[in-house]
Image (spheres, rainbow, N blue to C red):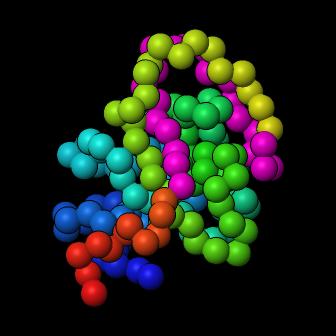
Amino acid sequence: MVCSPNKGLNSKKPKHYIEAKCDDSFLVIPEDIRNGALKILCPVDCQKSEAKVFGSGKFELRSSMCRAAQYLGLMKDKFATFIEVDHNEVNTDIGVQEPSLENQVQTIEVKDPNQKFFKVKPVDIATMCPNQS
């Protein structure tokens, strides 16, 4: 099921989801729509991307959103994948995050706990289009 996509990150239409590129960080999302949880559609084959991921579990805003989802095991190799990203839920006082390797993604250590972070969660597809028939 697919509903009301926003082609690229510059759309001014109401947001159901944003189509991202594998290398897109949270910082490419316009500031006026960054509040709350955002649904992101990650494309197929992000495992081929070399975009950086800073942190592990909670990710610096400059991290690739889709690669962070891959690190967490949320990406399916041959399918585009919906994820939810939210930076409002994250406590910035998290301490040092060690680098680690999971699901073919090597993360980079975060030493500054005063950075802003985002979390990545899976999305229940059935909740994507509640007002559309």
Which residue is more in the foreground, 38 or 128?
A: 128
Note whether residue 21 is visible. no
- Count of all numbered marks drawn on residues in the image: 0
Q: Is residue 73 above or below residue 9?
A: above
Residue at 46%, 36% in the rendered image: 118
Which quarter of the figure is the N terminus placed in?
Answer: bottom left
Q: Is residue 57 above or below residue 132?
A: above
Q: Which residues are magenta?
A: 102-122
- The image shows residue 114 at horizontal and vertical percentages of 45, 14
Q: Quadrant of residue 111?
A: top right
Q: Quadrant of residue 76?
A: bottom right
Residue at 27%, 42% in the rendered image: 35
Left or right for 46, reference 116: right
Check the image and name the residue furthest to the bottom.
133
Magenta-drawn stretch contains 123? no
Residue at 75%, 45% in the rendered image: 105
Residue at 49%, 39% in the rendered image: 119
- The image shows residue 51 at horizontal and vertical percentages of 63, 48
- The image shows residue 26 at horizontal and vertical percentages of 43, 44
Note whether residue 69 is visible. yes
Which residue is more in the foreground, 130 or 6?
A: 130
Magenta-drawn stretch contains 103? yes
Q: Quadrant of residue 133?
A: bottom left
- The image shows residue 125 at horizontal and vertical percentages of 46, 69
